[in-house]
Amino acid sequence: MAARAVRGAVPLERDDADHMDEQATAPLPAVLERNGLTADDLISIWLTATPDPHSDVPAAAARGLGIVDLPLTCAQEPDVEGALPRVVRILAHIESDRPRAEIAPVRLGAAAALRKDIAQ
């Protein structure tokens, strides 16, 4: 098995702790399903958010999903003028036999606009 990384992103409709809990980890199940992975394939997860959500941290939402035995790290994205607001991104480190080119990211909702060069 090789260590790989896979990305996901989701926009938040509003800066609200309950909404953050519901949405921040939404890309993770989609990433697992799209790439034929299970929770046991996860090594660690980085969660980032744009500077505008202040209600909670994305890792709290992940812990709420029951992800308690993985290293999680949160960070803030750069404050870039014109960037899509209230976006949470994940970078999951995984174990997979798939070639790197076959690992597929998941960008939900308006977050699909983040990488128009990658077909979803």
Image: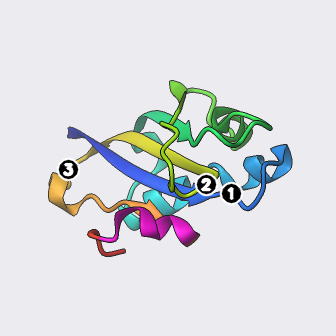
Residue density around tag 1, few if under 14, some if 14–19, many if 20 or more, within 10 Å: many
**Amino acid type shown at disc 1:** Leu
Quadrant housing the C terminus = bottom left
Furthest-bottom residue in view? Answer: 119
Q: Which labelled disc corresponds to residue 85? A: 2
Nearest to the observer: residue 22 or residue 65: 22
For badge 2, the amino acid type reads: Pro
- Residue 35 shown in magenta: no
* Alpha carbon separation for disc pair 2 and 1: 8 Å
Circle 3: residue type:
Asp
Q: Where is residue 81 drawn, in percent x and y?
A: 50, 49
Question: Which segment did they paint magenta?
Answer: 110-116
Label 2 or label 1, whichever lies nearer to me, is: 2
| 40, 43: nearer the viewer | 43
Q: From the viewer's perspective, is 43 left or right of 90?
A: left
Residues at badges 2 and 1 in contact (C-beta under 8 Å)? Answer: no
In front here: 71 or 74? 74
Q: Nearer the viewer, mark 3 or mark 2?
A: 2
| Residue 22 rendering spot, x and y as whole percentages | 75, 54
The mark nearer the N terminus, 3 or 2, is 2
Tell me the residue that label 1 is attached to.
12
Q: Is residue 35 above or below residue 87?
A: below
Residue 85 at x, y = what percent? 61, 54
Question: Pointer 3: what residue?
Answer: 97
Q: Secondary structure at mark 3?
A: loop
Say which residue appears at 51% left-offset and 24% top-offset. Answer: 71
Q: Residue at (51%, 64%) from the top-left corner?
A: 111
Image height of 88 relative to 78, above or below: below
Q: Check disc 2 and report its element: helix, strand or loop.
A: loop
* Residue 1 sits in quarter: top left
Q: Is residue 47 left or right of residue 21?
A: left
